[in-house]
């Protein structure tokens, strides 16, 4: 994909698969909602979820986003993740709005964050690969 095509693709509300490294070295993969902005992937998770625990031990991860219809397209990226609580609510709302209506996004994020323990994860890719069928 060209850089412009990549930006258009990553703006689509597709579900991504995030792979993190378990303490035993095996991989853990999970579906996530994400947002891509300024060259970084953003998502949120529970800090004590499998993803959260794995990222605290090893901050390296990979993400894959793919279509399921023609023309088939995908983007994979790998890099280092930073975990923070700064901007958690605002970014979580921004991400949820990609997948839900405004009202449903607000309700979902409020309920999800009310329990506490969520963190914002920022994946800064050191490599991005993209492909699309003709």
Image (cartoon, helix red, strand yellow):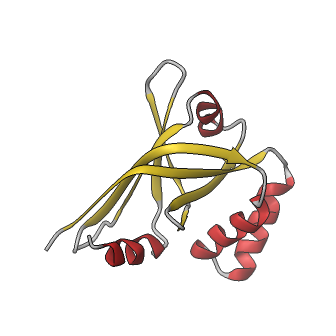
Image x and y of residue 15, in percent:
47, 62
Q: Which residue is found at the position 31% from the left and 62% from the top? A: 74
- On screen, residue 76 above or below 2: above
Instruction: Please name whichever residue, 1 or 43, is drawn nearer the observer in this view of the structure.
Output: 1
Q: Quadrant of the C terminus?
A: bottom left
Image x and y of residue 35, in percent:
56, 66
Q: Which residue is found at the position 84% from the left and 48% from the top? A: 116
Q: Which residue is found at the position 72% from the left and 40% from the top? A: 47
Where residue 46 sits, quadrant-wise, is top right
Q: Which residue is found at the position 22% from the left and 74% from the top? A: 71
Residue placed furthest toward the left: 134
Instruction: Please name whichever residue, 68 or 54, is drawn nearer the observer in this view of the structure.
Output: 54
Residue placed furthest toward the top: 24
Tell me if 112 is positioned left or right of 66 in this view.
Answer: right
Tell me if 61 is positioned left or right of 108 in this view.
Answer: left
Image x and y of residue 67, in percent:
33, 67
Instruction: Please name whichever residue, 62 or 101, is drawn nearer the observer in this view of the structure.
Output: 62
Residue placed furthest toward the bottom: 102
- On screen, residue 11 above or below 114: below
Image x and y of residue 16, in percent:
46, 57
Instruction: Please name whichever residue, 55 or 67, is drawn nearer the observer in this view of the structure.
Output: 55
Q: Quadrant of the N terminus?
A: bottom left
Where residue 113 sits, quadrant-wise, is bottom right
């Amino acid at each position: 994909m060209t850089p412009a095509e990549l930006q258009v693709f990553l703006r689509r509300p597709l579900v991504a698969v995030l792979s993190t490294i378990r303490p035993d070295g095996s991989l853990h993969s999970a579906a996530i909602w994400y947002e891509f902005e300024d060259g970084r992937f953003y998502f949120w998770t529970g800090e004590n979820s499998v993803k959260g625990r794995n990222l605290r031990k090893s901050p390296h991860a990979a993400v894959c986003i793919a279509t399921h219809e023609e023309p088939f397209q995908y983007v994979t990226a790998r890099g280092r993740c930073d975990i923070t609580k700064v901007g958690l609510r605002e970014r979580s709302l921004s991400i949820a709005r990609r997948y839900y209506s405004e009202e449903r996004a607000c309700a979902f994020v409020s309920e999800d964050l009310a329990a506490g323990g969520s963190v914002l994860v920022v994946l800064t890719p050191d490599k991005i690969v993209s492909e699309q069928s003709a």
